[in-house]
Amino acid sequence: MGESRSDLLAWLNDLLQISYTKVEQCGTGAAYCQILDSIYLDVPMARVKMNAKHEYEFIANFKVMQNVFKAKRIDKPIPVDKLVKCKMQDNLEFLQWIKRFWDSNYGGHAYDAVARRRGQATDTPATIAPLAPTRGAGGAGLSAGAGRSGGKTPVSGHRSGSSAAMQHEQVLNLQAQLKEVSSHLEGLEKERDFYFAKLRDIEILVQQQLEALESAGSDDETLREIQKILYSTEDGFEVPEAGALPVDEEETF
C-alpha cells in the first residue's frame, strides 16, 4: 500500500515550499520536476512553469521531466497523456512512485526550493477548472426567474446584457489562449527546423566523404554507422513510396 494522499501532500508541500491542496495539481508536471531537482540539483527549473494552467504548458513541463529521466537512466514510463488530465487516481499512483524513488535517492542535503525555482509563483488552482463559467450557474438563475414570472424566460434587459458580456469575455479569453498556443507552436517549429538543418548538413557531409572514399577504393565504418543512424526509422514507421509526398517533404527524419 502506498502512502495516503494527506501524507503525500504534507511531504510535497514541506519539500517544495508550496501549498497544494489536491494530488490532482501534480498533473501540471511542475512538482514532479522539482522533486527530481531536489535529488539531483541540476534540473533546468527556469524551463519549468510552476503556475502552469493549460495542458500544453503541462506537456512542456513533462518534456523537461522526460529529459531528466533519459539523462539519469531512470527506467520508468511516464504516462503523460493520463497525468495531464489531472485525475486523482493517476497522479496519486505516480506521486506514490516518485516518493519511493525520492526516499531511495535523496542524499539528505539541504534544499532551498524557492531559490531553485527563482521565486516563481506557484498559484496553481486548487482544481483544474474549465476555461469559462459553465452554463449550470447561469441556468439556475434563469430557472428561478422563470418560476417567478409564470415560466417565461426574459429575452431582454439586464440579464441578457450580462450574458452577452460574459460571452464576449469568453471569446477574448479563448483568443488570448489561441494566440499563446500559436506562439508556442511557432517556437517548436523553429526548433524542429533548426535541428533538421543540422542533420541535413551532417547527411551531406557523410555522403560526400563516403563517395570520396569509394572513389579511392576505401571505406569508413564509422561514417557508415552515422549514415545508418540518419536513415533509421522508428518501429512501425513506413517510408512513403516515391511520389507519395511533395518533393520538399520527401526527405525527413
Image (tube, helix red, strand yellow):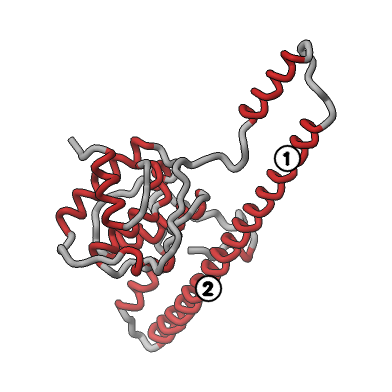
Q: Residue at x 46, y 57 (%)?
A: 60
Q: Which mark is residue 194?
A: 2
- Quadrant showing the N terminus: top left
- Looking at the image, do the residues carrying marks 1 and 2 touch, with CB atoms under 8 Å apart? no
Q: Nearer the viewer, residue 91 or 12?
A: 12
Residue 33, image quadrant: bottom left
Measure the alpha-carbon separation of dots 1 and 2. Answer: 41 Å
Q: For mark 1, give the secondary structure.
A: helix
Front of the two marks 1 and 2:
1
Earlier along the polypeptide chain: callout 1 or callout 2? Answer: 1
Q: Which residue is mark 1?
A: 167
User: Could you say where residue 136 lies in the image, as x and y percent from the top left?
Assistant: 61, 27
Dot 1 crowding, Cα within 10 Å, few <14, some 14–19, many 20+: some
Q: Residue at x 52, y 66 (%)?
A: 192
Q: In the displayed structure, does residue 65 sit left or right of residue 55?
A: left
Q: Nearer the viewer, residue 143 or 182?
A: 143
Dot 2 crowding, Cα within 10 Å, few <14, some 14–19, many 20+: few
| Farthest residue, direction right | 156
Q: Nearer the viewer, residue 251 or 114?
A: 114
Q: Which mark is residue 195?
A: none
